[in-house]
Image (cartoon, helix red, strand yellow):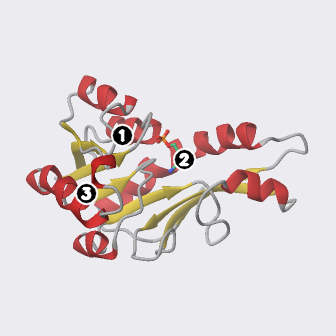
Amino acid sequence: MKRVAILISGGGSNMIKLVESMTGDHPARAVLVASNDANAAGLQKAAQMGVATAAIDHRPYGKDRAAFEAELLKPILAAQPDILCLAGFMRVLTPDFVGQFAGRMLNIHPSLLPKYPGLHTHARALEAGDTAAGCTVHEVTPVLDDGPILGQARVAIAPDDTPDTLAARVLVQEHRLYPAVLRRFAQGDRAPLIL
Ligand code: GRF
């Protein structure tokens, strides 16, 4: 049984779908939900689902990312995860942290990578006049939003879309894609899944 730790920063809607998916004959189980914000609403939801939680506030560490990550690593390593899932986790991780989970850390990003790494992906797609948007699950490597693609789901852009209406439709696809990719990944299948 693979052990999965999930990192969040906010509501954790993707985390909830991941935790809910890991039941029955699923080859993995959630063992920890950790956040850089003690007030992240997802932490309460994780606890309600019976998953251990941890919160390490990044603010006291200022620009010292390494010091923050050293603290964040403590509950993560104590949970002994096989796989680390970033799900709405909004802190950039150092290459050193990423290196400790090389080949076993996933992230979901709300664009069709390699287009629009970084923030404000939907506004950028609309600004560019794109006709499609979507989300990507990828392996996390030291370069932000850049690792091997494990899955993608596309969403048509409507003429009257705003960043918010588009984000809402993409989020629905994120909630389908991430659990499906995690299940395959936990079974050692890294072939890209295109929904
Ligand atoms: C989602 O758009 C996700 O793609 C991005 O963070 C946003 C919020 O995710 N990584 P969640 O609701 O906290 O899972």
Tell which circle, 2 or 1, labels the residue nearer the N-terminal end.
1
Residue 27 appears in the figure: no
Give the image location of residue 82, x and y in percent.
19, 61
Q: Nearer the viewer, residue 46 or 23?
A: 46
Residue at image x 42%, y 62%?
A: 92
Q: Nearer the viewer, residue 56 or 184?
A: 56
Number of labels in the image equals: 3
Q: What residue is pinned by disc 3?
A: 68
Residue at image x 46%, y 74%?
A: 147
Q: Secondary structure at mark 3?
A: helix
- Please identify, in this view, whether the residue under mark 2 or under mark 1 is nearer the observer: 2
Q: Secondary structure at mark 1?
A: helix
Q: Quadrant of residue 185?
A: bottom left
Give the image location of residue 149, x and y in percent.
51, 70
Q: Nearer the viewer, residue 24 or 69?
A: 69
Q: What residue is pinned by disc 1?
A: 21
Give the image location of residue 32, x and y in percent.
21, 43
- In the rendered image of this protein, does residue 139 appear above or below residue 164? below
Looking at the rendered structure, the kind of residue marked 1 is: Ser
Crowd rating for badge 3 (residues with CA inside 10 Å; few <14, some 14–19, many 20+): some
Q: Determine the CA span between mark 3 and mark 1.
A: 30 Å
Residue 122 appears in the figure: yes
Q: What residue is pinned by disc 2?
A: 174
Q: Determine the CA span between mark 2 and mark 3.
A: 28 Å
Tell which circle, 2 or 3, labels the residue nearer the N-terminal end.
3
Establish whether ligand 1 lies closer than 8 Å to the Cβ of label 2.
yes
- Please identify, in this view, whether the residue under mark 2 or under mark 3 is nearer the observer: 3
Looking at the rendered structure, the kind of residue marked 2 is: Glu
Give the image location of residue 182, x and y in percent.
37, 55
Contact (CB < 8 A) between labels 2 and 3?
A: no
